[in-house]
Amino acid sequence: DIQMTQSPSSLSASVGDRVTITCRASQSISSYLNWYQQKKGKAPKSLISAASNVQSGVPSRFSGSGSGTEFTLTISSLQPEDFATYYCQQSYNTPYTFGQGTKLEIK
Amino acid sequence: QVQLQQWGAGLLKPSETLSLTCAVYGGSFSNYYWSWIRQPPGRGLEWIGEINHSGSTNYNPSLKSRVTISVDTSKNQFSLKLSSVTASDTAVYYCARVFDLYSGYDYFYFDYWGHGTLVTVSS
């Protein structure tokens, strides 16, 4: 199985901050990398697919980059509704695997 | 608009079989794979497996010996059975649609999700 490792596991930030979350794969996965946002008690929501394709309806402050084994999710200016847990997920092969999550909290 | 509605028993005893069903409303059922994903309380996400309309399946090897995913195309539904459950199977179980961003290039991601069903295994 491909192991996905996110850093940091948790992050405190303020409204307006620029935030970057990193996801590393245990082997090259090209651009087969997706990002999800999950709020407490809710199902995950797709934010970005294929490493950098922002889903329709997702605010432009969200962006993704990377290829191979290292990927980043960037939120350019944090808004109150962005405080949530973020997961990366590889779709290079099955079993699809997720990172352990990054919990973004208000400072 | 695509909606996934899921249901099933929420409390099981050890050794029983977990059974959940997910109904798909709106959009095509036949053109996609459909997945089950679970999340233990306070923990991360684990992909369980997937099925398409013709019944072709892929399972997570870590659960393969206990998992069966089936499909009923007449009702646009798919189901999960997990046998011999233990406390470690306690989790919120989600159904989700697998979407291929660039059709044919296998850039899959989970675009629509069910609301989740908490399944607790306890004696």
Image (cartoon, rainbow, N blue to C red):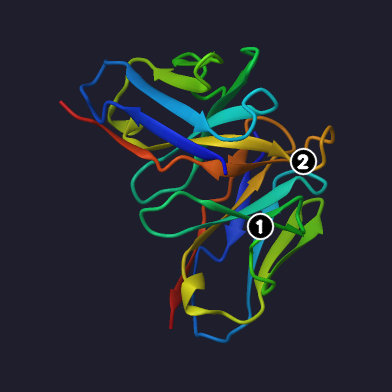
State the image coordinates of residue A106 (x, y, percent, origin top left).
43, 79
Horizontally, is B46 left or right of A70 in the view? Answer: left
- Alpha-carbon distance for marks 1 and 2? 18 Å
Q: Nearer the viewer, residue B60 or B118?
A: B118
Residue type at tag 1: Cys
* Residue shown at 78% from the left, 44% from the top: A29
Q: Image quadrant of residue A96?
A: top right
Q: Chain of mark 2?
A: B
- Indicate which disc residue B107 carries: 2
* Residue shown at 64% from the left, 64% from the top: A58
Horizontally, is B14 left or right of B53 in the view? Answer: left
Residue that numbered label 1 is attached to: A23
Mark 1 nearby-residue class (10 Å; few <14, some 14–19, many ≥20): many
Above or below, B39 against A5 in this view is above
Judge depth for marks 1 and 2 and give the one in front: 2
State the image coordinates of residue B122 (x, y, percent, origin top left).
19, 29
* Residue shown at 79% from the left, 35% from the top: B106
* Residue shown at 37% from the left, 42% from the top: B40
Q: Kindly indicate whether the residues beneath marks 1 and 2 are on one polypeptide chain.
A: no
Secondary element at tag 1? strand
Secondary element at tag 2? loop
Residue type at tag 2: Tyr
Quarter containing the C terminus of chain A: bottom left
